Image (cartoon, helix red, strand yellow):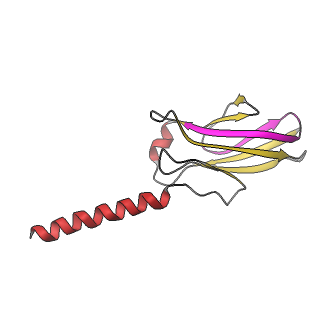
Amino acid sequence: MAALCIDLRRPAGAFLYDMTKPRLTIDGYDVPVHDWGQNYFDVVVGGPHRVEIYVPYVFPRRVGRAKLDVMVPEEGVALEYMAPSITFAKGSLGAPGQQKSSGFKAVWAFTIVMLLLVLAGVILRR
């Protein structure tokens, strides 16, 4: 029996993701996920499988969709999923240690611009 290990990750500071847990399908079948972090799944047979992950949310209903066709050898395979920083962005699914949160740079750029505007408003008000 082949095993699939998926590390389900979320961006630092994205506390809203803690209110729910990701949903996973393997070959179109829903598979129960324990929580964020390492999850192990027994795949009946090694070979090609389609893995799809998303996080349930209010709007849009499915955040961070990611899918990957993966060849699972008999000894198993490890994957990593990273949820996006922005709800309308896609998630990232692939090799461990290489997945980045999409939208992360945009969130930081927006935050810096807003801080500069507030700072400029405070300085000009004097």
**Could you tell me if residue 70 is visible in this image?**
yes
Q: Is residue 8 magenta?
A: no
Q: Is residue 80 above or below residue 55?
A: below
**Helix, strand or loop: magenta stretch:** strand
User: Where does residue 39 sit, x and y in percent of width and height?
Assistant: 70, 42
In the rendered structure, the answer to whether residue 98 lies left or right of residue 11 reads right
Q: Image quarter for residue 115?
A: bottom left
The residue under the point 74% across, 41% down is 40
Of 62 and 78, the residue lying toward us: 62
User: Toward which corner of the image does residue 16 lie, by quadrant?
Assistant: top left
x, y (%) of residue 58?
45, 33
**x, y (%) of residue 12?**
50, 55
The N terminus is located in which quarter? top right
**Residue 120 vertical placement versus 106 (above, below):** below
- Range covered by the magenta-colored residues: 36-55
* 77 w.r.t. 33: above or below: below
Identified at 91% across, 44% down, the residue is: 74
